[in-house]
Image: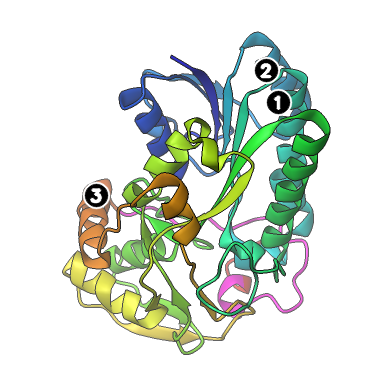
Amino acid sequence: MSKVLVTGGAGFIGSHLVDHLIEQRGDEVVVLDDLSGGFRDNVNPRAEFVEGSIVDHKLVDRLFADHAFSTVYHLAAYAAEGLSHFIKRFNHTNNLIGSINLINAAVNTSVNCFVFTSSIAVYGAGQVPLTEDTLPQPEDSYGIAKYAVEQELKVSQEMFGLDYVIFRPHNVYGPRQNLGDRYRNVVGIFMNRLMQKEALQVFGDGEQMRAFTCIDDVIPAMASAPEVPAARNQVFNVGADQPHTVKDLAQAVMHAMDKQGTIEHVEARNEVKLAWSDHSRLKEAFGPQPQTPLSQGLSTMAAWAKTHGIRSSQDFEHIEIKKNLPPSWRKATKD
């Protein structure tokens, strides 16, 4: 039995990972989460829950001193790529500085392996499908912070011997996704709006292409990473192979929810048009990976969403830059 830390373990991906670690692997899990985007009810009752932020370096240091963690799974982040342009200080404080606090503590307490959930946002625009050999050129503050953490892990391994595994997932959806977050997780946003009989807002022409990934398809590799020798100190794309347009996704969500809605095209925002990944490297190290068809994954999430019910969308209250803020966000934000 290993004792592991999962940051962001009350969130969407993190809570599913915690369940897998406890129920499939028998690990002893400590969850650190500030509940800014997750929910206490998501946390497996067999995990030890600590409410707090990774930005609080004193709390982080105490937690690592009190527990002999063999592994850290770092998933805590505010993953709103488009919004990150307008909340640079908030983004880098939470997504970069908070990560540095964890890396410092991991080095100081001789953690065996640090598993980091990065993002394909590090790539920016490039030839698709994106491969791990693609030169990262992030185009938003979120991707910049994620790539900086990747670089910090690389130099920390070289300097201090802290082994790591980095995953770059993309467009993950499924039960427990925060339906009330209006800035990220398009599947959840669409389902929540449908239940409220509101139009599905699509930025621009809706021809943006993404490979929408069922949560069940990313957890097994992430959980097993520390015990896969070929994964040590490597970077892996993880997710679905088949891309779809956002416009087609909207139709697929309506079908899964069995609700006919309308699509409202709003002003295009600054975002990468085409982004999906190649997963050959992952398959070489971890073996064949599950690939849930979009219709099946959406059906499972739709059943959960209907039971879960409508969630009010909270506005981000502390926009730092309002210049060029998309109109559909500007009218909902507060000074």
Is the residue under label 3 in contact with that under label 2 (CB below 8 Å)? no
Q: Type of residue at label 3? A: Trp
- Residue lying at the far top in this picture: please name it: 66
Q: Residue at x 66, y 33 (%)?
A: 163
Quick check: is 138 in the magenta stretch? no
Which quarter of the rendering shows the C terminus? Answer: bottom right
Q: Nearer the viewer, mark 1 or mark 2?
A: 1
Q: Type of residue at label 2? A: Phe
Q: Is residue 5 visible?
A: yes
State the extent of the magenta-drawn residues as a range.
Answer: 310-329
Residue 295 appears left or right of 114: left
Is the residue under label 2 in contact with that under label 1 (CB below 8 Å)? yes
- Residue lying at the far left in this picture: please name it: 258
- What is the crowding at mark 1: few (fewer than 14 residues within 10 Å), some, or many (at least 20)? many
Q: Nearer the viewer, residue 219 or 307?
A: 219
Give x and y (percent) for residue 123. Answer: 64, 67
Sequence-wise first label, 2 or 3: 2
Sequence-wise first label, 3 or 1: 1
- What is the crowding at mark 3: few (fewer than 14 residues within 10 Å), some, or many (at least 20)? some
Q: Which residue is mark 2?
A: 64
Quick check: is 315 in the magenta stretch? yes
Q: Residue at x 34, y 73 (%)?
A: 198
Q: Which residue is mark 3?
A: 304
